[in-house]
Amino acid sequence: MKIQTLIPSIFLVSSLYAADSTQCIRIMSYNCENLFDYEHDEGKEDFEYTEFSAKHWTKSKYYAKLHRTASVIARCGEWGDVAIVGLVEIENERVLRDLTQKTQIKKAGYSYLHKESDDERGVDVALLYQPEKFTPLKTEFIKLNFENSRPTRDILFTTGVLPSGDTLSVFVNHWPSRYGGEVETESKRIEAANAVRHKVDSLFAVQKDPNIIIVGDFNDYFDNKSLSQTLEASTDLSSPYENKRLYNLMSKYKDRDDIGTHKFQGHWGILDHVIVSGALLDGNRLDATGDGAQIGFWEFLLEKDKTGVAPKRSFKGDFTTKGFSDHLPVYIDLEIK
């Protein structure tokens, strides 16, 4: 296991904040759609992403996808670099190292948090961060164990310090997929929601006004039990907000059929969520209201389909395209007052 992190003193971070007129932190989440390197990892079922597979996944294809992924992150940081990036469907530390050191986002100076999970395909989650804007203090990888089922990826949980000295707790999720049937797999996503809810409750118990953001690919929609009942993520964004409740900022898109983060059988849906604690909505020290959560519904990430447009994905069966992902990125701006 390797967790790379960089922890300067809080006093140094605070001094940097005082010298920097920018008081806005952008936070992004992105399912990269199978960002694998081109070599086999011992013990992982990743042969599909090797040179002699049906995909013929070569070094050049790998680096092309790395650069396309980096371009999405760069586009999201339109007025500056994205401070915190939650990544879903990355294979290993090598991918993170190559992404942060060998692409156009190298200048952003990202460090990262990652741990190899027990997922048999080798799919993990990770967090990129700029040390001068977010300083991790404590990181945990929450394991999910299902009886008589294949191991799955961990949930990444970290608490860090912002330039203002405020703490922020971040969860990066990739809950079990619906492969095998929505109803048949629902209990796994409910269990994942239970794991996050348990950690959230522990934060609520020890902190007066905890600043929490929960992002990733949840493989469930607003009204599914995992989100609405177990995690208790409210879709009511009308104030007043309660500091110790969770609010799903993607619910502004709830009744839209012309936009989403993922498209299935011709229908847009929201599988990638941005959920925050009420303390981030009260307009005091930290404020995530503004324009709320946004979808990177950018033209270069889209292609025409039978019902309009859809994400320009990287793979269509064994055919490798010049696309990006089957998901679109989501992001919010956190204003530091």
Image (cartoon, rainbow, N blue to C red):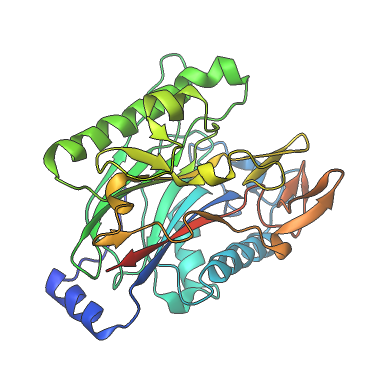
Based on the displayed image, in which of its 4 quarters is residue 323 positioned? bottom right
Q: Position of residue 242 (x, y in %)?
A: 27, 41
Image vertical order of residue 306 relative to residue 201, above or below: below
Is residue 323 in view?
yes
Of residues 56 and 277, the one drawn nearer to the viewer in this rendering: 277
For residue 329, side relative to residue 53 (left or right): left
Based on the displayed image, in which of its 4 quarters is residue 194 positioned? top left
For residue 261, side relative to residue 93 (left or right): right
Q: Where the C terminus falls, by quadrant?
A: bottom left
Q: How many marks?
A: 0
Residue at horizontal 21%, vertical 81%? 18
Of residues 318 and 254, the one drawn nearer to the viewer in this rendering: 254
For residue 35, side relative to residue 2 (left or right): right
Residue at horizontal 39%, vertical 41%? 247
Q: Position of residue 238 (x, y in %)?
A: 42, 44
Image vertical order of residue 195 relative to residue 161, above or below: above
Is residue 91 in view?
no
Which residue, as the protein is rendered here, is positioned at the far right? Answer: 306
Q: Position of residue 223 (x, y in %)?
A: 52, 27
Q: Position of residue 104 (x, y in %)?
A: 55, 76
Residue at horizontal 25%, vertical 35%? 199
Based on the displayed image, in which of its 4 quarters is residue 236 positioned? top left
Which residue, as the protein is rendered here, is positioned at the far bottom? Answer: 19
Of residues 7 and 227, the one drawn nearer to the viewer in this rendering: 227
Residue at horizontal 44%, vertical 36%? 153
